[in-house]
Image: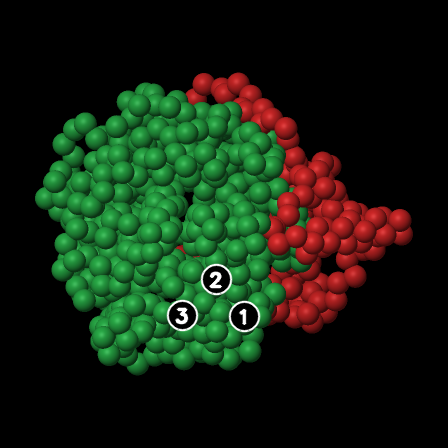
């Protein structure tokens, strides 16, 4: 529903984006008494009608394979996924420098990418904040684990995260709900890891196993990816926006594509210009402070497009670092066939969607062939049948007839999958910038990506592949993934952006010549401008970034609130 | 009819819940499940598939249906790919995908013309042993490696086998055949039955 804004109205804060960072800021700022406008580029989400929870594949004409089977090559094309998350958006391109392969996942909906994420909620460790001091690469953060720990506590207490206390130095404990009982595929991994001396513990996921603030616990249908009608998993749209709305101080403006952050003669942010996607009319929101939370690369694009007489290189960019230090996670995947799982009697294997156990970084206490670390996410077993599930079996078995039919049944549930997720070290060849030649359908200049993986990333992917194989073979299975050290994807290394953990392009730091923001996500150059999403990261630990984004945005918002009360912004 | 009314009422109530307050509302898992079971029931009540092929002309549709059933046939335990609606699923996807149109539309034509070359009649008019003979050639990649003339047939059959498996195993009877248990709301997750030693 478009809001009618009285001309001349000045909000205390304008937040751009409604995902993890925007949602946390909206909750903290409105509950603190500020009047907030929030711009979201997409429409409202309506869980009751938008989510396909509990729908069987045969209830959809396309069986979940998407129009023309599009989901076989692009999973966002399945009609099962929570709405408006895309690998490509018509009319809104991005470009890639020659030699760069990069994918950019974007959402256009209230709640942003929190509607689509895996709900893996891992804390950065103490060492993750001081990488340079540890091994001389990258940079240290201006904050320590002690600074952020209270905000991890607040976030976990409010959104609800399951897990167990394990005292693992690389994977700090949090405030946890009890974890769900392991399923068979989890136990296969546990058995293999016990043999190999690899840590394997209950995973940490933002899914309720106990009621919290009126949200019922998970009902174990394994469909988080479709969106959860009971809001038993965390999304900004269902968990952070509602309490902000309830204060009566949040004005949510949907279908609002931010074009530029406006500044006054003193070089302070005075509002945001946006285009209303439903009318194609340019509009403006005036505010005393601006929080940029549009997702790492969208926020970067907005800063770089906000050029003015005072800020010819874009806003918050006197250092020139905006767009640089782009990082994704190092990703490599594997698959195995486990005969023991073939023998399992039919049983309900659903659980929460995704892993109940996981492998945290376990080689922190030794010297490895590469710097930093990775964790392993996994799954498999008797999941709900889906389009594409038997392509691999058909390909391997070939033939046709009763023999094929029975073979598929026999193999159903006997496969496991592993995803290594590791820390990438930033490099000078990986960044994004404004493409001077291309605008999107709204007339907004688009991003051009440059991405290169270094030798450390390749060595890490090699180690992942070796570990996957050893796990599968430790439980009598056959490792099915073939990778090569050569080519575009050495050891199965995923292309940049594919893991959807892009961060770092407006990093925080103590030195205003080498960073864009201070430790509270406040721009060094513009006191009333904050960037609270993944752009503020200094390094990209092997942890999935969302929990840290929530904690940093919460922390920045409390600081902004305090400064606003003191009259400093 | 009473089912339709109650479904509409339920959806209406959900819609009211949605617009009444500024905050997003949630519904119970039981209510979510209930809606879907009603939708499912409604579809079943409508009876039959009522599907008119969008891409394949009648003679190719007939050939497609025959091949689907040969790939995943009915047996004593359960129906096959045709009962599962695989031909309709494949036709729908093909009508939207130009690559499938080329591979599947072209592949069906290739199969018929190959049968005419070999047996002087199209596939459906061939004897059971002739049909088996040609399928046994295109159902395995190594045959195309030995005889490149079989290449288009092998590529066609590989895609058709994939899509037929999708159509069957995502159907109600296919899911039952696999003995998948789930897609329900549970108060507690039971975990894994005793895992056999590997």
Mark 1 near mark 2, Cβ–Cβ under 8 Å? Answer: yes
* Disc on the earlier residue, 3 or 2: 2
Residue A547 falls in which quadrant of the image?
A: top left
The reply to the same-chain question for discs 1 and 2 is yes
Residue at x 71%, y 63% (from the top left corner): B62
Mark before the other along the chain sequence, 3 or 1: 1
Q: Secondary structure at mark 1?
A: loop
Indicate which disc, 1 or 2, sits on the residue closer to the N terminus: 1
Q: CA distance from mark 3 to mark 1?
A: 13 Å
Q: Are marks 3 and 1 in contact (CB under 8 Å)?
A: no
Residue A272's tag is 3
Residue A476, placed above or below residue A399:
above
Residue in view at x 52 percent, y 65 percent: A253
From the top left corner, tell me how far across and down residue A9 is, in percent.
49, 69
Q: Identify the residue under disc 1.
A: A5
What is the spatial separation of the Cα atoms under label 1 and label 2, in whole angstroms? 10 Å
Q: Which chain is green?
A: A
Q: Residues within 10 Å of mark 2 (few under 14, many from 20)?
A: many
- In this rendering, the answer to whether B22 lies above or below A254 is above
Relative placement, left or right, of A523 versus A254 is left
Label 2: chain?
Answer: A
Q: Which x, y percent locates residue A363? A: 22, 30
């Amino acid at each position: 529903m478009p809001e009618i804004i009285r001309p001349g109205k000045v909000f205390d804060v304008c937040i751009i984006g409604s995902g993890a960072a925007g949602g946390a800021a909206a909750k903290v700022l409105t509950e603190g008494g500020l009047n907030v406008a929030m711009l979201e580029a997409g429409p409202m989400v309506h869980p009751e009608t938008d989510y396909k929870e509990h729908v069987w594949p045969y209830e959809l004409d396309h069986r979940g394979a998407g129009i023309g089977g599009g989901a076989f090559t692009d999973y966002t094309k399945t009609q099962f996924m929570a709405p408006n998350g895309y690998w490509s958006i018509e009319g809104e391109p991005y470009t890639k420098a020659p030699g760069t392969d990069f994918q950019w996942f974007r959402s256009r909906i209230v709640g942003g990418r929190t509607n689509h994420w895996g709900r893996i909620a891992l804390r950065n460790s103490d060492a993750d904040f001081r990488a340079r001091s540890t091994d001389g690469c990258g940079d240290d953060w201006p904050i320590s684990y002690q600074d952020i720990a209270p905000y991890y506590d607040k976030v976990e207490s409010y959104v609800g995260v399951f897990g167990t206390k394990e005292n693992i130095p690389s994977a700090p404990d949090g405030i946890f709900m009890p974890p769900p009982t392991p399923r068979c595929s989890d136990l296969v991994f546990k058995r293999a890891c016990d043999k190999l001396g690899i840590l394997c513990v209950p995973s940490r996921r933002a899914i309720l196993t106990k009621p919290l603030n009126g949200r019922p616990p998970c009902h174990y249908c394994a469909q988080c990816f479709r969106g959860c009608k009971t809001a038993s998993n965390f999304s900004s749209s269902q968990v952070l926006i509602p309490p902000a709305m309830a204060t009566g101080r949040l004005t949510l403006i949907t279908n609002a594509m931010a074009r530029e952050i406006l500044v006054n003669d003193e070089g302070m942010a005075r509002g945001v210009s946006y285009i209303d996607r439903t009318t194609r009319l340019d509009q403006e929101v005036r505010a005393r402070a601006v929080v940029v939370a549009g997702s790492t690369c969208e926020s970067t694009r907005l800063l770089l497009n906000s050029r003015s007489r005072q800020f010819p290189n874009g806003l918050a960019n006197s250092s020139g670092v905006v767009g640089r230090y782009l990082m994704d996670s190092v990703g490599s995947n594997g698959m195995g066939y486990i005969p023991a799982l073939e023998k399992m009697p039919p049983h309900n294997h659903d659980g929460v969607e995704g892993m109940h156990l996981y492998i945290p970084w376990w080689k922190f206490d030794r010297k490895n062939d590469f710097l930093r670390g990775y964790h392993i996410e996994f799954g498999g077993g008797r999941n709900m049948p889906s389009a594409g599930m038997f392509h691999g079996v058909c390909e391997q078995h070939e033939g046709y007839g009763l023999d094929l039919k029975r073979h598929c049944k026999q193999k159903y549930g006997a496969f496991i999958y592993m995803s290594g997720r590791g820390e990438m070290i930033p490099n000078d060849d990986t960044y994004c910038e404004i493409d001077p030649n291309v605008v999107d359908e709204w007339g907004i200049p688009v991003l051009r990506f440059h991405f290169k993986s270094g030798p450390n990333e390749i060595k890490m992917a090699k180690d992942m592949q070796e570990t996957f194989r050893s796990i599968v073979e430790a439980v009598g299975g056959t490792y099915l993934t073939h990778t090569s050290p050569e080519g575009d994807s050495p050891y199965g290394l995923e292309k940049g952006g594919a893991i959807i953990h892009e961060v770092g392009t407006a990093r925080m730091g103590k030195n205003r010549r080498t960073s864009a923001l201070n430790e509270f996500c406040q721009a060094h150059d513009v006191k009333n401008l904050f960037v609270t999403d993944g752009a503020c990261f200094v390094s990209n630990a092997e942890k999935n970034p969302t929990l840290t984004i929530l904690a940093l945005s919460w922390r920045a918002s409390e600081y902004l609130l305090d400064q606003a009360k003191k009259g400093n912004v | 009819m009473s089912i339709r009314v109650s479904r509409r009422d339920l959806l209406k109530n959900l819609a009211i819940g949605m617009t009444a307050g500024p905050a997003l509302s949630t519904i119970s898992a039981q209510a979510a499940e209930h809606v879907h079971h009603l939708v499912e029931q409604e579809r079943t009540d409508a009876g039959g598939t009522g599907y008119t092929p969008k891409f394949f002309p009648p003679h190719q549709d007939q050939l497609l249906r025959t091949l689907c059933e040969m790939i995943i046939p009915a047996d004593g335990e359960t129906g096959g790919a045709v009962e599962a609606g695989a031909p309709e699923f494949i036709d729908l996807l093909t009508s939207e995908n130009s690559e499938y149109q080329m591979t599947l539309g072209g592949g069906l034509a290739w199969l018929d013309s190959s049968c005419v070359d070999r047996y002087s009649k199209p596939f459906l008019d061939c004897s059971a042993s002739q049909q088996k003979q040609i399928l046994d050639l295109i159902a395995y990649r190594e045959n195309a490696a030995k005889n490149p003339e079989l290449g288009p047939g092998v590529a066609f059959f590989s895609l058709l086998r994939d899509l037929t498996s999708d159509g069957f195993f995502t159907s109600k009877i296919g899911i039952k055949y696999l003995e998948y248990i789930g897609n329900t709301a549970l108060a507690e997750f039971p975990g894994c039955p005793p895992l056999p030693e590997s």
